[in-house]
Amino acid sequence: MTPAVYSAAMSEEPSVATPATDPYALAQEAGRAVLDRFGVGRVDAWFVLGSGWSAAAEDLGEPVGRCPLGDLPGFSAPAVRGHGGELVVLRNDRGTVIAVSTGRTHFYEGRGVAPVVHGVRTAAAAGARTLLLTNGCGGLNRAWPPGTTVLLRDHLNLTGATPLVGPTFIDMSEAYAGRLRELARSVDPGLPEGVYAQFHGPQFETPAEVQMAGRLGADLVGMSTALETIAAREAGLDVLAISLVTNLAAGVSATHLSHQEVLDAGVEAAPRLRTLLAGIAAAL
Ligand code: 8IG
């Protein structure tokens, strides 16, 4: 399944794929580690909480346990302030087991695509069928001020990269499951939908790049999610993705962008995000 190129690129040893460097094998190992560590037969749903969303991890169900992500095979401690770094496992009233990870590896860290999608592949290896991806992003629509939550209807992968190698022709025509978007709207009927463009980052866009993304059909710009969704579709996971607009994208408003603004928007929105996630978690 995985070409030897992977191990050749990542180790000193030439052309022999070993379990330690095959990203799929590493995810199998991590999925097994999650099940063993928390004593659950399978995880049903996996949530990834991005910028601004970390505080929403509580109250999603009866806690089963938690551990630093770095304790699990293939995960590393998060690089960015405001990006958690923990896995919380819980069970909702219906017996659904949900694993919630705070913090993610970003493509802009420069470690390649495999670490970016390791959590997604681990989720699938642990048995998950449903993946909820959340992020903080820039908004292009002035009618969606900072603090607005938006369901992803589709994405533009502008990274020039993909987690897939070889003739892996995955259908992306319904990358974000309509059924899950309906479920989210049953919790919050007012949730708008938009198209998310993933840029490489880490720099925010220039106003011209934001304008380009808008002309291509984007409503939101960010640095995550699209690559993870591609890996999720390969793994057969149904994906729900929700963005928190933390700032208007460059050039959309007169003010300049700061990471502090992003953190502040997350803090301000936290109670609403928590209610939204709790509603979704209860319905799974
Ligand atoms: I939070 O304005 C956050 N993440 N690319 N642009 C991009 N990523 C972001 C932005 C933004 N805000």
Image (cartoon, helix red, strand yellow):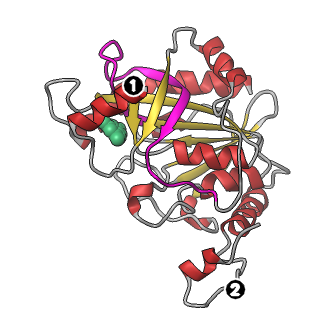
Whether the magenta-drawn stretch holds residue 141 is answered as yes
- The label on residue 269 is 1
Q: Quadrant of residue 118 in the image?
A: bottom right
Q: Which mark is residue 148?
A: none
Percent position of residue 220, x then y: 40, 29
Disc 1 marks which amino acid? Ala
What residue is at 41 percent from the left and 29 percent from the top?
Answer: 216
The secondary structure type at the circle numbered 1 is: helix
Q: Residue furthest right?
A: 41
Q: Is residue 228 left or right of residue 157?
A: right
User: What residue is rendered at 32% in x and 33% in y?
Assistant: 212
Quadrant where the image shows the N terminus: bottom right
Q: Is residue 51 left or right of residue 126?
A: left
The x and y percentages for residue 105 are 48, 56
Q: Which residue is mark 2?
A: 16
Observer-nearest residue: 198 or 42?
A: 198
Residue 109 in the image: above or below residue 6: above
The percent coordinates of residue 239 (x first, y second) are 66, 35
- Badge 2 amino acid: Val
* Separation of residues labelled 2 and 1 (CA atoms): 48 Å
Q: In the figure, 75 relative to 59: above or below?
A: below
In the image, taking residue 107 as reference, residue 98 lies left or right, namely right
Look at the image and give the residue range highlighted in magenta: 136-164
Residue that protrudes farthest toward the bottom in the picture = 13
- The quadrant of the picture showing ligand 1 is top left
Furthest-top residue in this view: 189
Up the image or down, 282 lies above or below 104; here it is above
> Which quarter of the rendering shows the C terminus?
top right
Residue located at (52% from left, 14% from top): 191
Where is residue 39? Give x, y as percent.
80, 55
Dot 2 lies on which element? Answer: loop
